[in-house]
Image: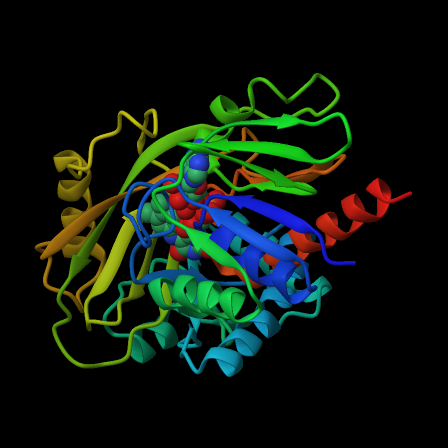
Amino acid sequence: MSRHVIVIGSGLAGSAAARSIAQLGHRVTVLERFEESHLRGSSHGTERVFRLTYDDPKYIQLGLEALSGWARLSEETGAPLLHQVGMLDYGDAGVLATLEESCASNGVELERISQRDASLRWGGIKFDSDVLLQPVGGWIAADLALKAFASSAKRSGAEFHYHSPVLSIAKVRSGGWSVETQGDTLAADAVVVTTAGWTHELLSEVIDERFEVPPIKVTTEVVAYFERRDASLWPSFCHHLEPEIYGLPSPDGLVKIAEHGSGAETHPDERSFEPDAATIQRLEEYARDCLPGIAPTAVRSATCLYASTPTDDFFIERSGSLILGVGLGGHGFKFGPALGDRIASLVTDALAEASQ
Ligand SMILES: Cc1cc2nc3c(=O)[nH]c(=O)nc-3n(C[C@H](O)[C@H](O)[C@H](O)COP(=O)(O)OP(=O)(O)OC[C@H]3O[C@@H](n4cnc5c(N)ncnc54)[C@H](O)[C@@H]3O)c2cc1C
């Protein structure tokens, strides 16, 4: 039986969930506080790393699900989403050994390449260790992916309402939910909350002690873009230092590099959009010292929020017919299609339970 599901938030998690839920045949309404593709959350920009190199097998499994999910979304929408230019991990020997072991025991192909051979193959990068090459890794066209999730969801009947902040949600006595927006109150059989760093404020009235939603820390992260010195193909890469430095090609021909998770804590409504000058300077120094294939002056930069749980694990859980998909932090994008399906499966459970 078709039910009404309200999804709050239209970032990666909300857009992917809306599609998966609408494809189950439910009526879906997405309520987004800001405009489409806005810059105030975590999901804007043109590219994100795709990799399966995780030490935790649950993320490898999720990544494998996402791999086929990206292919299906591309096929359905005609958008080129996953660019498998390869993923390189290098740096800390202990980290490489762990990644190698976890990938091997989960059937994921990794090739170990000596520092010398890697330098000959990818002259734009100065390696300080052996390199693990993951051929299926690369980057996702993030802005196209968000549009693809939304257009696919709409094709299955989902409605997206922008400039529609949800002010509160409340459980109604007959079961289901009442969702208050500016000037309207909507009824839903289930509510999916994908509001990242805004979650606790929205849910303070409805989360009880039985639903242990972890704290979500918000940080402002900085990314910087550099010009390539030549037209050679760039892989995505992660240099395992403290903090990790990662990089990837961008669709406009630049190379994006960033520190993973070094940003200052903030509140999502009070954050600055001005990239931190000291971080840009460190990235330029890193580019000069370690990336001979790019000109070491950032040609542009941007900020973006991580909204992370204390363990950096996602919180995809339900309490009755309230489903949360939050805490995606700095590594959630690659899993988009799989996260949408996981959330939709919790919606199925919730609706089945409610009809018993
Ligand atoms: C700099 C940076 C680089 C990253 N790089 C990678 C990468 O290479 N690979 C990777 O896999 N991941 C990466 N990530 C992580 C990934 O982008 C995020 O995990 C993902 O985008 C989080 O999506 P989200 O939907 O949880 O959050 P958001 O995109 O923030 O979406 C939450 C939405 O909820 C809306 N909202 C909030 N409150 C309300 C309300 N009351 N009513 C209505 N709407 C509301 C917000 O407006 C927002 O649109 C990166 C993130 C950043 C910031």
Comparing 29 with 205, the one in front is 29
Where residue 213 sits, quadrant-wise, is top right
Where residue 222 sits, quadrant-wise, is top left
Q: Is residue 149 left or right of residue 147?
A: right
Residue for point 23% across, 64% down: 255
Regarding ligand 1, which quadrant of the image does it lie in?
top left
Comparing 251 with 290, the one in front is 251
Residue for point 25% across, 74% down: 123
Quadrant in the picture for the N terminus: bottom right
Give how far across and how far down residue 139 sits, in percent: 40, 68
Comparing 356 with 350, the one in front is 356
Give how far across and how far down residue 193 sits, in percent: 56, 39
Comparing 235 with 275, the one in front is 275
Residue for point 59% across, 70% down: 69
Give how far across and how far down residue 77 sits, in percent: 47, 78
Give how far across and how far down residue 184 sits, in percent: 47, 35
Residue 32 visible: yes
Quadrant in the picture for the C terminus: top right
Count numbered badges in the picture: 0
